Amino acid sequence: MVSDIEKRIHEGMPGYIEALKRLVRIPSISFDNFDQKYVLDSAEAVKAMFTEAGYTNVQFLLPPSGRPTVYAESLTSPENPTILLYAHHDVQPPMREHLWDTKPFEPEIRGDRIYGRGTSDDKAGIITHVAACEQVRKALGDKGPNLKFIIEGEEESGSAGFAEILAKNAELLKCDAVIIADLGNFAKGTPSITTTLRGMSAVNVTVKSAKAPLHSGSWSGPIPDPGQALCRMISALTDKDGNIAIPHFEDGIVKPTPEELESYGSLGYSEETFRKEGGVLDCVKLNVPGDKILETLWRRPSIVVTAMEVGSRTNAGNVLQDSAYARIGIRLAPGMDADACTQMLVEFLQQSVPNGLECSITAEDGANPFTTDIAHPFFKKMSEAMAEAYGQPTKFIGCGASIPGAELFRSTLGDIPILMTGLEDPECAAHGENESLYLPDFEHGIVAEALFFASLT
Ligand SMILES: [Zn+2]
């Protein structure tokens, strides 16, 4: 039966690619300064797909913004496990349109990739779920798992209403596991399950010494310079290798298991590749040795100054500035708590203000990091299904970025396995120009999910 499913998916691929194209043609950018009619159009298109495929209880779950999340289900029997399938139908803006080789919302296949905004992030996630479910319903009928879909409409603009949607519909969404098809593979052709995400937070700091800027010749010397004061505060946050100096900041960190470290090591990621992909200048010495790069990206916190202002470059002159500003961003490793760490950062900064300068700090909303226990049997089943579909061993990887939805699913639906898959890869340029999807892995991803469903029976 396994080869049967694979065969039918292979035959169905032209149709799945067409379905993907239809969604990509809708510019469903979920930012207020874009026409929100298209987010509604894409929600309608997704809804129609479910209705035509015979799903039941198809409906919009509406957040306060009105950007619909689409729900649908196919229930077989209470005896069977229930899997909740997540993806999102909104997209990022096209960014700098002149840098696209083809129009962002006119999908085009070149070589083994299809180009267009949303191809990999995350309209391929929707079609992966739809296609895998279609085949499994055909092959297994009532023996297959209960399937529930939740296709969000405002992930790219921050998921502001998602917590409310989950809380209001917790009973409807009840399940034994969630598959979030919104991440990616470590490399094309390398099946990957993401098991950790970093959290994030940021603070805005202003220090002030005088009521207004002053002539530097007449006034500098006795009066402390806010620019240098702020730099001292910032430099106290870390040592020269980027290790964070705030006491107790890292107390909660969950260390990677030997299995995870082995999986990271087996990826064969080199310092050379990292430097090339990140455009790091040859003269720059990294904070960590090459064999620690992935662990540092995925399992260690970081602090960076994301913006800084003392006067302005266009008006630079001989001025003693009255104030200085910086935005300081933190990335949090699994186990750390966003609110607690933000508070520690604020207090540490306040305690390090030199010369009694006036200091005001505001904190932005943070997102908690995420980690999932891969001991649950579903991870083994998914890992085997992916290895079978791709013909390559599955890797357990981390992600340095944040997806608030992962933690929200668990806090709302209970301590269930959250399987994070997806079809982004290092070449896909998600969020950038010329976003694309690697077509062979599109098929592998669909087969993998279908085989996973089949393994649950
Ligand atoms: Zn996404």
Image: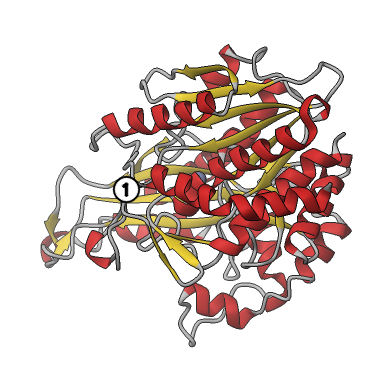
The residue located at (32%, 48%) in the rendering is 93
The spot of residue 153 in percent (x, y) is 44, 31
The residue located at (27%, 29%) in the rendering is 37
Residue 435 lies left or right of residue 7; in this view the side is: left
| Badge count | 1
Residue 34 lies left or right of residue 179; in this view the side is: left
Classify mark 1: residues with Cα within 10 Å, few (<14), some (14-19) or many (20+).
many
Query: Given the image, on which type of amino acid does mark 1 rest?
Result: Pro
The spot of residue 25 in percent (x, y) is 34, 46
Residue 245 is at least partly visible in this image:
no
Residue 158 lies left or right of residue 29; in this view the side is: right
In this orientation, which residue lies closer to the viewer: 269 or 358? 269
Q: Quadrant of residue 305?
A: bottom left
Find numbered disc 1 in the image and state the secondary structure of the residue it sits on: loop
Farthest bottom residue in view:
283
In this orientation, which residue lies closer to the viewer: 4 or 452? 4
* Colouring scheme applied when the structure was drawn: secondary structure
- Label 1 CB-ligand 1 distance < 8 A: no
In this orientation, which residue lies closer to the viewer: 58 or 404? 58
**Residue annotated with mark 1:** 93
In this orientation, which residue lies closer to the viewer: 349 or 93? 93
The spot of residue 391 in percent (x, y) is 77, 65
Q: Quadrant of residue 316?
A: bottom left
- Give the quadrant of the C terminus: top right
The spot of residue 295 in percent (x, y) is 71, 63
The residue located at (38%, 49%) in the rendering is 327
Residue 175 is at least partly visible in this image:
yes
